[in-house]
Amino acid sequence: MKKTSRRMSPLQETIYRFCRNKVSLIGLAIVICLLLIMIFGEWISPYGVGIKQNYKIRLQPPSREHLFGTDGYGRDIFTRVIHGAKYTMSVAIPAAVFAQAIGVILGACAAFYRWLDDILMRILDVFQAIPGMLMALAIVAATDTSLPKLVLAIMISCVPGATRLARAVMLTLVGQEHIEAARSYGSRDYQLIFRHIIPNALGPLIVDLSINMSTITLQVSSLSYIGLGVQPPTPEWGVLLSEAREFMPIAPHTILFPGIAILLASLAFNLVGDGLRDALDPRLRD
C-alpha cells in the first residue's frame, strides 16, 4: 500500500517553519504571557495592592510577601509591574496598529497612483527629516500627556516609515499579471487595491508591525520616564523606572524588575518579527 504525502498549504507551511524556530517560539510565548497578564492582571494581583502606600515597609527587598519588593512609598512592585503591562501596551498596541493601517493605505495609493507617489513621498521626506522620537516629544509637549494624545503622537511618528515600506512592497505587485487581468475584467481601483494588492503584501507588513511593536514599547516607556508620557502614580513601566531613580543605589530591585519587563517585552516582539520574516521568506523555503 503506497503512502501518500499531503502537500501543506502556504499558511500551514508558514506555521510549520515558524515553529521550527525555537527562539521565535520563546518570543511568542512571552508575548502570549504578556497578553494574558493584561487581561487577567486584576486576578493575579488586585490593583489596590499596587497603589496602597505603607511607609513602614518601604524599600523592602524581594520576599514571600512582596515578590519584587516594595518601592519608596511602600507599594508592591510586583503588582505595579503586572498592571504596568496594561498601560504600556494600551498605548503601544493601538499606536502600532493604527500607524501600520494608515501606512498600508497610503503606501498602496502611492504605489497604484504614480501622480500621487511624488507628492506623498516629498511630504514624507519632510516628516522623516525629524527623528521619530523627537517628533513624538514635540507633539506631546504641544498638546498634553493623556493616553489618547500619547497614542496619536507615537502613531504620527511611525506613519512615514510604515508608508515607505508598504509602498516599496506594493510597487512590486502593481505591474504583475494578475493585477492587469483583474483590471481587464472591469475591477475598480479600490477593488484592485483592497482585494488584490494589499492582501498579497500582508506578509512583510505583518513582520514590520511586529518589529515596530518592539520600538514603540521602548518609545512609550522613554516618554513616561522623562515625564512626557503616562503620569504618576499610574504604574506604567517607564513611570516605575523614573520613580526608582533616586533609590537605585540603596534599593536596586526598584529599578531592576520594571527594566526587565521592558526588556522582555521589546525582545519578545523582535524575536517574533524575526521568526515571521524567516517563515515568510520564499527564498528560504525547501
Image: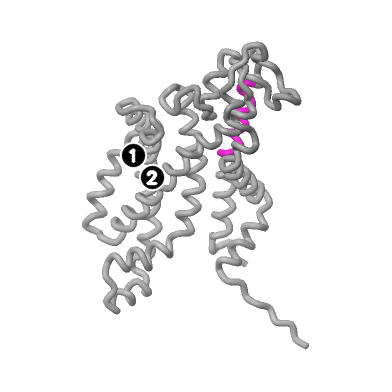
Q: CA distance from mark 2 to mark 1?
A: 8 Å
Toward the viewer: 119 or 182? 182
Q: Is residue 256 magenta?
A: yes
Main secondary structure along the magenta-highlighted residues: helix
- Horizontal arrangement in the rendering, residue 5 relative to residue 14 (left or right): right
Badge 2 marks a residue whose secondary structure is helix
Counting from the top left corner in percent of width and height, residue 234 is at 50, 26
Q: Residues within 10 Å of mark 2 (few under 14, many from 20)?
A: some
Q: Residues within 10 Å of mark 1 (few under 14, many from 20)?
A: some
Badge 1 marks a residue whose secondary structure is helix
Counting from the top left corner in percent of width and height, residue 1 is at 78, 88
Q: Is residue 259 magenta?
A: yes
Circle number at residue 128:
1
Label located before the other in sequence (2 or 1): 1
Residue at numbered disc 2 = 161
In magenta, the rendered stretch is 254-266
**Residues at marks 2 and 1 touching, judged by CB atoms closer than 8 Å:** yes
